[in-house]
Amino acid sequence: MKLHQLRYLVTIVQNGLNITAAARALHTSQPGISKQIRLLEEELGFQIFEREGRNVTRVTAAGQAVVEHAARMLEEAENIRRLSADFQDENRGSMSIATTHTQARYVLPPVIKQFRARYPKVDLHLHQGTSEQIADLAAADRVDFSIATGSHELFPTLALMPCFRWHRDIVVPRDHPLAFVTKPTLKQISEYPIVSYVFSFTGRSSLSELFERHGLKLEVALTARDADVIKTYVRLGLGVGIIASMAYEENEDRDLVAIDGSHLFPESVTWIGVRRGRLLRGYMYEFIRLVAPQLTRKLVNRALAEKDAAGVGAVLESIKVPSY
Amino acid sequence: MKLHQLRYLVTIVQNGLNITAAARALHTSQPGISKQIRLLEEELGFQIFEREGRNVTRVTAAGQAVVEHAARMLEEAENIRRLSADFQDENRGSMSIATTHTQARYVLPPVIKQFRARYPKVDLHLHQGTSEQIADLAAADRVDFSIATGSHELFPTLALMPCFRWHRDIVVPRDHPLAFVTKPTLKQISEYPIVSYVFSFTGRSSLSELFERHGLKLEVALTARDADVIKTYVRLGLGVGIIASMAYEENEDRDLVAIDGSHLFPESVTWIGVRRGRLLRGYMYEFIRLVAPQLTRKLVNRALAEKDAAGVGAVLESIKVPSY
DNA sequence: TACAGTTACGGACCGCGTAAGCATA
DNA sequence: TATGCTTACGCGGTCCGTAACTGTA
């Protein structure tokens, strides 16, 4: 049993049992992989893959068990390499983040700016996507961090740590009737068409449900994927915008009025997720602290050492999560 | 980074930083190990060992971290090999048990007999010793199972699972005055010298303390390490014996009377311990069930998957532990 | 006829063991 | 002088890439 045989094995599984694809991913030749897998199967004394003719079609039950142990071994090997990188030059390395539009556009810029100033030699990679795309990247271990809101169930392998709480703002043009109301009611808002996020209208605790529960009719003028688009159409007078409070920018949005909607809409929490059991580079702890000062190195380590989401929850239960 | 380099590394640590000893343990040459360690250090970019002249004297902080990750990798590798063995011939293999005299002499014989009948091709190794010796064997991962009573704190890396509860018996010759008392009091017993286990007189909840709490004087005639010796001296009329209930044998001990002492002395629990995170062979699950039917395969797996003793405790909290 | 995997082969590399060298107690 | 680690070197095994072959959609 060799480490690279195990690496081949899990890469084949990750590539949908396509050996050629695995070979490309590993920058090596396909025959080499085939042979090593055969040797491994020979050594273990049982088939890892079921084959139909020449093609690999399924993982056997025994094979599945091997793959799981192998994956854990490779993860530890990766941890040792990260250790090595940290001891060689703790200021050099790379860091990849998958996140949603709101975080990437409004929350992260000042964080990234500070981080870059402190660690100029760290290569940064930012991937923007939907929750599902972020989950895929995280599941494939293609990113170091995931930063998003809600949807805990999409990220079963990560330790999700709360960064900050935030609420919704109602945004209207300066001359809009609502601009003169300090604490509008749902009923007052329902008199105008709504412009908000697509995902604010799906699932439980959606805007639609909220209005319905109050016996109000909700007229949706437009659903968008990000606050920039929403603000644009609010400016055009299409309706009343409901956006994340972080998305209202004092300077750029002077022509709009943001009204605190925390008395109307449920609070949300932005979390940062790291694959459990991972070893973080020194600068990664610093990055987390820039996003969420309450997440100390010690706390993060304890959370990452937990073996399931429930354990992580227990560790983080008592920490104070600031408002944005 | 190669698997065998990591194996060399942890073996050196296990052998007190003596490379020559590690080479002997690994059945290979000392220069080979030295070289591989140097290569590993070169690859990682930092020293794992501190050296004074030519001798290895300490593990560096970074090295310690590497050793820990490496140990986990090797454990997983071992798990894969065990998987392999199980799929090749699930009835063949080996199994080693470290246990105390009472368990080895009175509890395990019928268990082992059944096990041998079911799995004749499994090599059995039984190591008898004190709690401390058992703990050492378990810590060095030299045995598959530890079976003992009390002293949880000696076994931090094991998952300790309760097998059965047992109490103490008072044993006297058939013609002894106490032989005619069904439910003797501590006071009645204190009128005779006591013959019992060495360890029954040490630590908290010891016999001495028990008698003292009741304002009684305890006269110790003899302390022994096992019940066979105790019974022998009880036969000689040296005093009243206090032994584990399992140690009274209906057939062999007809000349003695055993009086249930559960109303006088605290109850004990015999547990079986397995290193957490280990993969067990099929027959090992069967062995556990022979010792303790309530420990199902599923339950054992859940216990072994926990990451600390507290987690194991939580998993096993609700199971019913039979009396012997 | 593409595509995926196997078989065959030569070259490069690498780990092991032996033997000799060096430092320390 | 014994112990323990390093250096040097040759052998054997192994892993890789290329190329040719086989089976399948």
Image (cartoon, coloured by chain):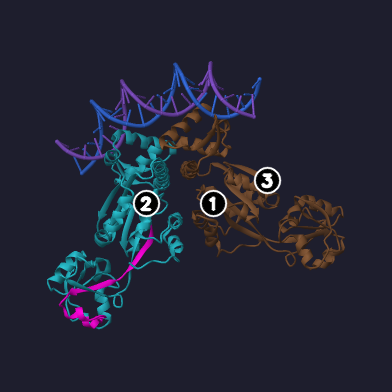
Chain colours: A brown, B cyan, C blue, D purple
Foreground disc of the pair 2, 1: 2
Q: Residues within 10 Å of mark 1 (few under 14, many from 20)?
A: some
Position of residue A3 measured from the top left corner of the image (x, y, whole percent):
45, 37
Dot 3: element = strand
**Residue B218, percent from left and from top:** 20, 78
Quadrant into which the C terminus of chain A falls: bottom right
Q: Which residues are magenta?
A: B159-188
Name the mark nearer the viewer: 1 or 3. 3
Considering only vertical position in the picture, is C16 above or below B262? above
Residue B121 included in the magenta stretch of the image: no
Res B58 label: none
Horizontal side of residue B180 vs A315, given as left or right: left
Circles 1 and 3 on the same chain:
yes
The residue singled out by tag 3 in the image is: A128
**Quadrant assignment, res B47:** top left
Q: Secondary structure at mark 1?
A: helix
What's the CA distance linking mark 1 and mark 3? Answer: 21 Å
